[in-house]
Image: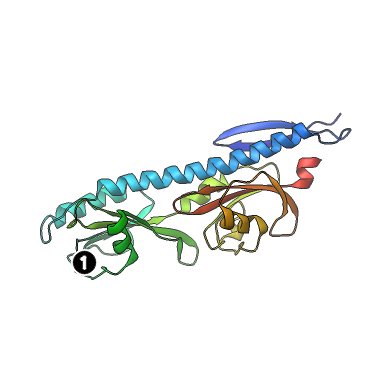
Protein backbone atom coordinates (compact mmCIF):
# COMPACT_ATOMS: atom_id res chain seq x y z
CA UNK A 1 0.00 0.00 0.00
CA UNK A 2 1.32 3.42 -0.91
CA UNK A 3 2.02 5.50 2.18
CA UNK A 4 1.40 9.26 2.07
CA UNK A 5 2.47 11.80 4.64
CA UNK A 6 1.56 15.37 5.54
CA UNK A 7 4.70 17.29 6.44
CA UNK A 8 4.48 20.63 8.22
CA UNK A 9 6.68 23.00 10.15
CA UNK A 10 5.19 24.20 13.42
CA UNK A 11 7.25 26.55 15.57
CA UNK A 12 10.47 25.31 13.99
CA UNK A 13 9.66 21.61 14.56
CA UNK A 14 8.94 19.21 11.70
CA UNK A 15 5.69 17.29 12.15
CA UNK A 16 4.95 14.27 9.93
CA UNK A 17 1.50 12.73 9.96
CA UNK A 18 0.51 9.72 7.82
CA UNK A 19 -2.36 10.36 5.40
CA UNK A 20 -4.65 7.83 3.85
CA UNK A 21 -3.17 5.43 1.30
CA UNK A 22 -4.57 4.88 -2.18
CA UNK A 23 -6.56 1.81 -1.09
CA UNK A 24 -8.68 3.60 1.50
CA UNK A 25 -10.70 6.77 1.91
CA UNK A 26 -9.54 9.48 4.33
CA UNK A 27 -11.18 8.94 7.68
CA UNK A 28 -12.19 11.31 10.41
CA UNK A 29 -8.93 10.80 12.28
CA UNK A 30 -6.88 12.02 9.32
CA UNK A 31 -9.03 15.16 9.06
CA UNK A 32 -8.53 15.82 12.78
CA UNK A 33 -4.77 15.56 12.34
CA UNK A 34 -4.73 17.97 9.38
CA UNK A 35 -7.07 20.43 11.10
CA UNK A 36 -4.96 20.40 14.24
CA UNK A 37 -1.72 21.06 12.37
CA UNK A 38 -3.20 23.93 10.35
CA UNK A 39 -4.49 25.54 13.54
CA UNK A 40 -1.13 25.06 15.24
CA UNK A 41 0.71 26.67 12.33
CA UNK A 42 -1.55 29.74 12.22
CA UNK A 43 -1.31 30.18 15.99
CA UNK A 44 2.48 29.70 15.97
CA UNK A 45 2.98 32.53 13.46
CA UNK A 46 0.60 34.81 15.39
CA UNK A 47 2.46 34.11 18.64
CA UNK A 48 5.80 34.91 16.99
CA UNK A 49 4.45 38.23 15.66
CA UNK A 50 3.10 39.09 19.14
CA UNK A 51 6.48 38.28 20.68
CA UNK A 52 8.30 40.39 18.09
CA UNK A 53 6.10 43.44 18.80
CA UNK A 54 6.46 42.95 22.56
CA UNK A 55 10.26 42.86 22.25
CA UNK A 56 10.34 46.01 20.12
CA UNK A 57 8.01 47.76 22.55
CA UNK A 58 10.15 46.76 25.51
CA UNK A 59 13.25 48.21 23.90
CA UNK A 60 11.50 51.45 22.92
CA UNK A 61 10.11 51.71 26.46
CA UNK A 62 13.66 51.50 27.82
CA UNK A 63 14.58 54.57 25.72
CA UNK A 64 11.51 56.54 26.82
CA UNK A 65 11.55 58.92 29.73
CA UNK A 66 11.42 62.52 30.84
CA UNK A 67 13.79 64.82 28.95
CA UNK A 68 13.81 68.49 30.00
CA UNK A 69 13.70 70.81 26.99
CA UNK A 70 17.12 72.01 25.94
CA UNK A 71 19.10 69.51 28.01
CA UNK A 72 20.32 66.00 27.60
CA UNK A 73 19.67 65.86 23.85
CA UNK A 74 23.08 64.45 22.97
CA UNK A 75 22.80 61.72 25.62
CA UNK A 76 19.34 60.77 24.37
CA UNK A 77 20.65 60.68 20.82
CA UNK A 78 23.30 58.19 21.97
CA UNK A 79 20.53 56.14 23.63
CA UNK A 80 18.66 56.11 20.33
CA UNK A 81 21.77 55.00 18.42
CA UNK A 82 22.09 52.13 20.89
CA UNK A 83 18.40 51.30 20.30
CA UNK A 84 18.98 51.11 16.54
CA UNK A 85 21.88 48.72 17.10
CA UNK A 86 19.86 46.51 19.42
CA UNK A 87 16.71 46.36 17.28
CA UNK A 88 17.47 46.08 13.54
CA UNK A 89 13.76 46.32 12.69
CA UNK A 90 13.64 49.95 13.89
CA UNK A 91 14.74 52.26 11.08
CA UNK A 92 13.98 55.59 12.75
CA UNK A 93 13.35 56.82 16.28
CA UNK A 94 12.41 60.28 17.49
CA UNK A 95 11.56 62.07 20.73
CA UNK A 96 8.67 64.53 21.03
CA UNK A 97 8.61 66.70 24.12
CA UNK A 98 5.56 67.18 26.34
CA UNK A 99 4.19 69.79 23.91
CA UNK A 100 4.55 67.54 20.89
CA UNK A 101 7.62 69.27 19.43
CA UNK A 102 10.33 67.12 17.94
CA UNK A 103 13.60 67.34 19.87
CA UNK A 104 15.55 64.40 18.41
CA UNK A 105 15.35 62.22 15.31
CA UNK A 106 17.84 59.41 14.70
CA UNK A 107 17.55 57.43 11.50
CA UNK A 108 19.24 54.74 9.43
CA UNK A 109 17.96 56.46 6.29
CA UNK A 110 18.67 60.17 6.86
CA UNK A 111 20.80 62.62 8.82
CA UNK A 112 20.15 62.88 12.56
CA UNK A 113 18.52 66.10 13.77
CA UNK A 114 18.49 67.78 17.18
CA UNK A 115 16.02 70.37 18.51
CA UNK A 116 14.19 70.82 15.20
CA UNK A 117 11.08 71.94 17.09
CA UNK A 118 8.71 70.50 14.50
CA UNK A 119 5.14 70.61 15.81
CA UNK A 120 3.61 67.11 15.83
CA UNK A 121 1.17 67.79 18.65
CA UNK A 122 -1.86 66.99 16.47
CA UNK A 123 -0.50 63.74 15.11
CA UNK A 124 -2.13 60.49 16.33
CA UNK A 125 1.27 59.15 17.38
CA UNK A 126 1.49 61.96 19.93
CA UNK A 127 -2.16 62.48 20.87
CA UNK A 128 -3.02 58.79 21.34
CA UNK A 129 0.26 57.91 23.02
CA UNK A 130 -0.28 60.70 25.57
CA UNK A 131 -3.86 59.57 26.18
CA UNK A 132 -3.22 55.82 26.33
CA UNK A 133 0.56 55.71 26.84
CA UNK A 134 0.95 53.48 23.75
CA UNK A 135 0.08 53.90 20.10
CA UNK A 136 0.38 51.47 17.18
CA UNK A 137 -0.45 52.72 13.71
CA UNK A 138 -2.08 50.74 10.92
CA UNK A 139 0.42 49.05 8.62
CA UNK A 140 1.80 51.35 5.94
CA UNK A 141 4.23 50.70 3.07
CA UNK A 142 7.52 52.29 2.17
CA UNK A 143 8.87 52.01 -1.37
CA UNK A 144 5.49 50.47 -2.24
CA UNK A 145 6.60 47.10 -0.93
CA UNK A 146 8.05 47.26 2.61
CA UNK A 147 5.46 46.98 5.41
CA UNK A 148 5.98 49.25 8.41
CA UNK A 149 4.13 50.45 11.47
CA UNK A 150 4.63 53.35 13.85
CA UNK A 151 5.04 52.56 17.56
CA UNK A 152 4.83 55.43 20.05
CA UNK A 153 5.25 55.21 23.82
CA UNK A 154 4.71 58.07 26.26
CA UNK A 155 6.79 58.63 29.35
CA UNK A 156 5.31 58.90 32.84
CA UNK A 157 3.85 62.22 33.98
CA UNK A 158 1.91 65.05 32.33
CA UNK A 159 5.04 66.82 31.11
CA UNK A 160 6.72 63.68 29.79
CA UNK A 161 7.33 63.31 26.08
CA UNK A 162 6.76 60.53 23.56
CA UNK A 163 9.28 58.26 21.87
CA UNK A 164 8.28 57.29 18.32
CA UNK A 165 9.77 54.36 16.39
CA UNK A 166 9.23 53.36 12.76
CA UNK A 167 9.31 49.56 12.65
CA UNK A 168 10.03 47.43 9.58
CA UNK A 169 7.79 44.34 9.50
CA UNK A 170 9.90 42.31 7.06
CA UNK A 171 10.53 39.80 9.85
CA UNK A 172 6.90 38.66 9.46
CA UNK A 173 7.67 37.64 5.88
CA UNK A 174 10.60 35.63 7.20
CA UNK A 175 8.29 33.87 9.68
CA UNK A 176 5.83 32.97 6.93
CA UNK A 177 8.56 31.84 4.52
CA UNK A 178 9.84 29.43 7.19
CA UNK A 179 6.42 27.76 7.52
CA UNK A 180 5.92 24.61 5.43
CA UNK A 181 2.26 23.74 4.88
CA UNK A 182 2.22 20.28 3.34
CA UNK A 183 3.55 20.18 -0.23
CA UNK A 184 1.36 22.85 -1.84
CA UNK A 185 -0.20 24.80 1.02
CA UNK A 186 0.52 28.43 1.89
CA UNK A 187 0.57 30.78 4.84
CA UNK A 188 -0.08 34.50 4.62
CA UNK A 189 -0.75 37.56 6.76
CA UNK A 190 -3.12 40.42 5.96
CA UNK A 191 -3.69 43.80 7.59
CA UNK A 192 -7.03 45.32 8.59
CA UNK A 193 -7.73 46.31 4.97
CA UNK A 194 -7.11 42.81 3.66
CA UNK A 195 -3.76 43.71 2.06
CA UNK A 196 -1.17 40.94 2.03
CA UNK A 197 1.91 41.94 4.03
CA UNK A 198 3.52 38.47 4.04
CA UNK A 199 2.95 35.35 1.91
CA UNK A 200 4.62 32.03 1.13
CA UNK A 201 4.62 33.27 -2.48
CA UNK A 202 6.25 36.71 -2.41
CA UNK A 203 4.53 37.53 -5.70
CA UNK A 204 1.34 37.90 -3.68
CA UNK A 205 2.64 40.75 -1.51
CA UNK A 206 0.38 43.82 -1.49
CA UNK A 207 -2.44 41.89 -3.20
CA UNK A 208 -5.95 42.71 -2.01
CA UNK A 209 -7.47 39.61 -0.35
CA UNK A 210 -10.33 41.51 1.27
CA UNK A 211 -12.94 39.74 -0.89
CA UNK A 212 -12.02 36.25 0.34
CA UNK A 213 -14.71 34.73 2.54
CA UNK A 214 -12.36 33.71 5.34
CA UNK A 215 -10.62 37.11 5.36
CA UNK A 216 -14.02 38.80 5.66
CA UNK A 217 -14.96 36.44 8.50
CA UNK A 218 -11.74 37.29 10.36
CA UNK A 219 -12.38 41.02 9.98
CA UNK A 220 -16.03 40.67 10.95
CA UNK A 221 -15.86 38.41 14.00
CA UNK A 222 -12.25 38.05 15.07
CA UNK A 223 -13.13 34.68 16.58
CA UNK A 224 -11.03 31.63 15.75
CA UNK A 225 -12.98 29.23 13.52
CA UNK A 226 -12.71 25.53 12.97
CA UNK A 227 -10.80 24.61 9.81
CA UNK A 228 -13.11 25.26 6.86
CA UNK A 229 -13.29 24.22 3.22
CA UNK A 230 -13.25 27.49 1.25
CA UNK A 231 -12.03 28.89 -2.08
CA UNK A 232 -8.60 30.50 -2.18
CA UNK A 233 -7.61 33.55 -4.25
CA UNK A 234 -7.19 31.30 -7.31
CA UNK A 235 -10.54 29.61 -6.89
CA UNK A 236 -9.14 26.30 -5.63
CA UNK A 237 -10.88 24.53 -2.79
CA UNK A 238 -8.66 24.57 0.29
CA UNK A 239 -8.81 23.71 3.96
CA UNK A 240 -8.09 26.95 5.81
CA UNK A 241 -8.02 28.56 9.20
CA UNK A 242 -6.65 31.72 10.78
CA UNK A 243 -5.32 33.27 13.99
CA UNK A 244 -5.47 36.89 15.10
CA UNK A 245 -2.57 39.11 16.16
CA UNK A 246 -4.24 41.45 18.62
CA UNK A 247 -1.93 44.45 18.41
CA UNK A 248 -1.31 45.46 15.72
CA UNK A 249 -4.46 43.88 14.31
CA UNK A 250 -3.28 41.36 11.73
CA UNK A 251 -4.76 38.06 10.58
CA UNK A 252 -2.64 34.97 9.91
CA UNK A 253 -4.05 32.41 7.46
CA UNK A 254 -2.94 28.89 6.63
CA UNK A 255 -4.35 27.00 3.62
CA UNK A 256 -3.90 23.46 2.31
CA UNK A 257 -5.46 22.25 -1.00
CA UNK A 258 -8.30 19.83 -0.29
CA UNK A 259 -6.98 17.45 -2.93
CA UNK A 260 -3.66 17.18 -1.09
CA UNK A 261 -5.36 16.39 2.20
CA UNK A 262 -7.60 13.73 0.65
CA UNK A 263 -5.20 11.88 -1.66
The C terminus, quarter of image: top right
Q: Answer above or below: position of 183 versus 147.
A: above
Return the x and y of residue 147 as percentages of the image width and height. 47, 59
Q: Is residue 224 left or right of residue 83?
A: right
State the image quarter where residue 130 is shown. bottom left
Return the x and y of residue 102 as percentages of the image width and height. 22, 65
For this orientation, the residue located farthest to the top is 1
Q: Is residue 57 left or right of residue 157?
A: right
The residue shown at (10%, 57%) is: 71
Q: In this rendering, does residue 93 appear at all?
A: no
Q: Is residue 80 left or right of residue 187?
A: left
Q: Answer above or below: position of 87 versus 191.
A: above
Total number of numbered discs in the rendering: 1
Q: Residues within 10 Å of mark 1 (few under 14, many from 20)?
A: many
Q: Which of the two residues, 205 or 44, is positioned nearer the viewer here? A: 44
Q: Answer above or below: position of 143 versus 221.
A: below
State the image quarter where residue 10 is shown. top right
Q: In this rendering, does residue 230 appear at all?
A: yes
The N terminus, quarter of image: top right
Q: Which of the two residues, 178 or 128, is positioned nearer the viewer here? A: 128
The residue shown at (41%, 58%) is: 149
For this orientation, the residue located farthest to the right is 23
Task: Give the residue number, with chain letter if any, for mark 1.
Answer: 101
Q: How is the image coloured?
A: rainbow
Q: Secondary structure at mark 1?
A: loop
Return the x and y of residue 23 as percentages of the image width and height. 89, 33
Return the x and y of residue 209 as percentages of the image width and height. 62, 61
Q: Answer above or below: position of 5 versus 99.
A: above
Amino acid sequence: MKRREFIALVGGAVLIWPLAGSAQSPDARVRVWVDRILRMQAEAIAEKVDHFIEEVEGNVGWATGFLPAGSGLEQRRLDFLRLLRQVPAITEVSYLDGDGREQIKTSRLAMDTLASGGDLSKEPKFVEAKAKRRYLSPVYFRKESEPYLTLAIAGTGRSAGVTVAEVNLKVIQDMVAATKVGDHGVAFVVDTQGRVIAHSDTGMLLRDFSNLDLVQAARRTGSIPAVQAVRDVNGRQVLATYAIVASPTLSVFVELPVEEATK
